[in-house]
Amino acid sequence: MSRLKEKVAIITGGASGIGASVARLFAAEGAVVVAADINEDALSTVSQEENIHGVKLDVTSDENWQQVIRDVEKEHGKIDILINNAGVTSEKTISEVDYKDWELLSRINGFGTMLGMKHTGPAMEKNGSGSIVNLSSVTSMIGMGLNSYSASKGSVRAISKAAAAQFGRNGVRVNAVFPGVIETPMSKGLESSASALERINRMTPLGRLGKPEEVANVLLFLASDEASYVTGAEIAIDGGYSAM
Ligand SMILES: NC(=O)c1ccc[n+]([C@@H]2O[C@H](COP(=O)([O-])OP(=O)(O)OC[C@H]3O[C@@H](n4cnc5c(N)ncnc54)[C@H](O)[C@@H]3O)[C@@H](O)[C@H]2O)c1
């Protein structure tokens, strides 16, 4: 399989859940994969696999990004794909939200995504092509009881459009995806609550949670040249949750 042959891909949050699944699929499709994550222990597992190189990156750090871009360009010559996937969640209700919670979620999910585009976009523009996919969430489209998280993912939705408009002139595509509840370490709390699980499954036309591989398959299409005329698009990967 070689849908990403000779492509160089950076996947943030690539050590766990959806990111690790994307890293494995992209490597299997011929890409050189740089799995960038703040969690070095988890990175050491995923980077044992063929064509996956683990690097430490805090997505909120300009300096970290500069270093990673320098190293990737030196080692692999270019950057074709960025999957802005690193993220954290918070389940605080509106009455519990404080500035610390709001700021943390916005810094990692929103600003981290922006920094990824700020640093990889110009490197892609230089080559006249590239594909960026940002992980928003269905919680930015409809109410699901998450607050600081929904707001931070709403900013991902908005900046994806802004970046698509700017980078498109130089051949760089930017799209956003909106997963529903996917079985990863992030959603463990929900999965272990029988009543929450029953409620979500009832509200999901396909009647079950999603799997990381089902998100990875959509990201593969968007990252590949098969999506050469797709930019500024929004794709829900939620079993129909947002259609209800
Ligand atoms: N799992 C879901 O139900 C779901 C639903 C919608 C959207 N998403 C989004 O998908 C993405 C992946 O989520 P997941 O479920 O795989 O979660 P996960 O917790 O399994 O993985 C998230 C990864 O991001 C990394 N990370 C956190 N902060 C970081 C930072 N500052 N710098 C670099 N890496 C950092 C973590 O170390 C971890 O490896 C997230 O953006 C999440 O918000 C997940």
Image (cartoon, grey):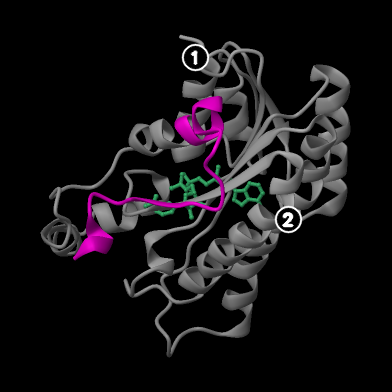
- Examine the rendered structure and indicate whether residue 224 appears above or below residue 86: above
N-terminal-most mark, 1 or 2: 1
Which residue lies under the disc numbered 2? 166
* Residue at the (73%, 37%) spot, across then down: 56
Q: Which residue is mark 1?
A: 28
- In what quadrant of the picture does the N terminus appear? top left
180 relative to 162 in the view: left or right = left
- Horizontal arrangement in the rendering, residue 166 relative to residue 243 (left or right): right
Give the alpha-carbon distance from disc 1 to disc 2, as whole Å: 31 Å
What is the x, y in percent for residue 110?
63, 63
At label 2, the amino acid type is Gln
Does mark 1 have its CB less than 8 Å from ligand 1? no
Q: Which residues are magenta?
A: 221-244
Image height check: is 27 above or below 134?
above
How busy is the neighbourhood of tag 2: few (under 14 within 10 Å), some, or many (20 plus)?
some
In the rendered image, residue 170, in percent from the top left (x then y), is placed at 76, 42
Which residue occupies 33% across, 75% down?
A: 143
